[in-house]
């Protein structure tokens, strides 16, 4: 298992770094060649597709949690049953998704406050939707299965190949100022490649899966609860830019998207590693329940600590980055001093509940959590609409921070008190210890803001700050987390014996 964890983590980390670098190049090219209006439009359409992805909500998570117990026992009959039920769900939603894409292609040109021609918006939406439709109908289930089986290095390599090719197409066509509708058509054609790669791999290695093994009336456990949670999270995470595009302007949505791009890159990097090895949590809970609590605490320190390292560095460098990144762009103001703090708080609170949230799912508490997820989404939407009128971009961002607190507290208390039958003190100590380090980074930046004039200085500062905060965060987590301390001591002992 350790070999598979290392393999998954390395492939995921390298893949995500490459994808992040390419992904950060594209928005600048779009802004310079098409303007902030078009950049805001394309990012908002992406957010709408995230809303539409809620049709898939719950299927993947429910299928993955159901697969854990069968994969650990190599129960092919059980695996086939889960896969056949999940495939049936995916196929049903594909038709609904296609219908919604057609409706949106007609409606959105009349909805957005944008100067982009309506026909261009329609074509962009149709082929953007077609890309997701291919994934829903064919590949999503295979990705879920391979991730549950601890083979996310396969899905990451295919994703890397697809993303690199996709970004090359976007960059080349954008530099040539090709109409964005044709760019989206090119993206759709590239999206067909993973279909054939997955098809070949699954036929070669898992031809024994029987997609007709389950009874027609069989359902995925807790699927409805996962639907509510996933739909709520999609609405929650996609609200801000849509509210800005509809109630303010797509230009301000472009500002939001520029800052969000940086934090999304960090989250993508962290999530890539997390999702590559989170199967350990699921399999440990089902196979070795007595060891789960220690694994839970170690994961908490590793993922919350790594988040604080990157968020602390990001907070200190993001304003200089945005200044350099938007140099030459004059159609709107991109420097908003207090946006980085809001984005950092959003990402910190999101990371603080990942391990606990995963536990509530595999332990069978999806229904209870789904209600809180729904409440969180409602709070975010209401506060965003109310606050955007007076506070603009700050209003939608800090509405998200306020809403996040609800579920973050709930899932951690549920995981500690109800599932693991223990005090919340360990979790709170790790949480506060890491948060204090981030607050120190905010204080230092306020007292001594960094003056970074070029990207060479930016990367040098970045490397130096990562090293400094890594040492501080590592030592702090050793001090406050007994399970993490024991884990590191065990690793050090093995190294010494070698």
Image: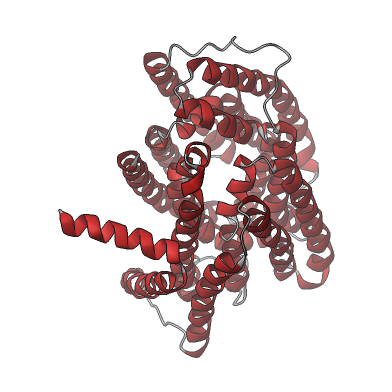
Which of 158/404 is in front? 404
Answer whether residue 28 is visible to the viewer in this image: no
Quarter assignment of residue 276: top left
Q: Nearer the viewer, residue 491 or 459?
A: 491
The residue under the point 79% across, 48% down is 371
Left or right of residue 162, residue 459 in this image: left
Left or right for 239, reference 162: right
Residue 3 visible in this rendered orientation of the protein:
yes
Residue 171 sits above or below residue 200 on the image: below
In the figure, is residue 389 to the left or right of 343? Answer: right
The percent coordinates of residue 477 (x first, y second) are 43, 69
> Does residue 433 lie above or below 138 as drawn?
below
What's the coloring here?
secondary structure
How far from the left and from the top, in percent, is residue 116? Answer: 68, 46
Name the residue: 64% across, 23% down. 90
Q: Position of residue 390 (x, y in %)?
A: 82, 72
In the picture, residue 379 is in which quadrant? bottom right
Q: Residue at x 79, y 37 (%)?
A: 107
Quadrant where the N terminus sits is top left
| Of 429 and 41, the residue lying toward us | 429
Q: Position of residue 118 (x, y in %)?
A: 72, 39
Looking at the image, residue 333 sits to the left or right of residue 178; the answer is right
């Amino acid at each position: 298992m350790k070999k598979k964890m290392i393999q998954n983590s390395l492939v995921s980390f390298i893949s995500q770094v490459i994808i992040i670098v390419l992904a950060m190049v594209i928005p600048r090219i779009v802004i310079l060649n098409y303007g902030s209006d078009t950049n805001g439009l394309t990012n908002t359409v992406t957010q709408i597709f995230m809303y539409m992805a809620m049709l898939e909500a719950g299927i993947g998570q429910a299928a993955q949690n159901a697969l854990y117990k069968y994969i650990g026992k190599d129960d092919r009959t059980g695996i086939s049953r889960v896969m056949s039920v999940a495939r049936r769900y995916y196929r049903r939603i594909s038709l609904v998704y296609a219908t919604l894409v057609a409706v949106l292609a007609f409606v959105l040109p009349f909805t957005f406050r944008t100067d982009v021609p309506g026909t261009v918006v329609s074509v962009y939406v149709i082929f953007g939707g077609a890309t997701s439709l291919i994934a829903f109908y064919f590949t999503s289930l295979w990705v879920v299965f391979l991730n549950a089986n601890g083979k996310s290095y396969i899905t990451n390599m295919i994703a890397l190949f697809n993303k690199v090719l996709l970004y090359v197409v976007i960059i080349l066509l954008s530099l040539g100022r090709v109409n964005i509708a044709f760019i989206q058509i090119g993206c759709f054609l590239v999206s067909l490649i993973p279909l054939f790669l997955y098809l070949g791999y699954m036929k070669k290695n898992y031809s024994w899966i029987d997609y007709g093994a389950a009874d027609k009336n069989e359902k995925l456990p807790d699927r409805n609860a996962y639907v509510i949670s996933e739909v709520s999270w999609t609405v929650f995470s996609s609200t801000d830019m849509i509210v800005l595009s509809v109630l303010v302007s797509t230009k301000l949505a472009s500002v939001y998207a520029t800052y969000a791009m940086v934090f999304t890159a960090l989250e993508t990097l962290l999530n890539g590693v997390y999702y590559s090895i989170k199967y350990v949590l699921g399999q440990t809970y089902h196979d070795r329940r007595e060891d789960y609590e220690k694994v839970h605490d170690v994961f908490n320190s590793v993922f919350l600590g790594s988040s604080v390292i990157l968020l602390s560095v990001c907070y200190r460098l993001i304003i200089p980055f945005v200044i350099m990144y938007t140099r030459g762009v004059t159609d709107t103001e991109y420097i908003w001093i207090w946006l980085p703090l809001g984005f950092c708080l959003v990402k910190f609170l999101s990371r603080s509940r990942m391990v606990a949230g995963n536990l509530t799912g595999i332990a069978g508490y999806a229904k209870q959590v789904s209600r809180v997820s729904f409440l969180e989404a409602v709070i975010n939407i209401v506060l965003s609409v109310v606050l955007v009128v007076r506070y603009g971009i700050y209003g939608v961002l800090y509405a998200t921070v306020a809403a996040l607190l609800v579920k973050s507290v709930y899932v951690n208390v549920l995981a500690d008190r109800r599932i693991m039958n223990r005090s919340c003190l360990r979790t709170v100590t790790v949480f506060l210890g890491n948060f204090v380090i981030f607050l120190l980074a905010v204080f230092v930046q306020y007292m001594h803001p960094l003056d970074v004039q070029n990207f060479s200085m930016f990367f040098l500062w970045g490397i130096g700050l990562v090293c400094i905060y890594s040492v501080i965060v590592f030592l702090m987590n050793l001090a406050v987390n007994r399970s993490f301390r024991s884990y590191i001591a065990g690793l050090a002992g093995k190294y010494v014996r070698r």
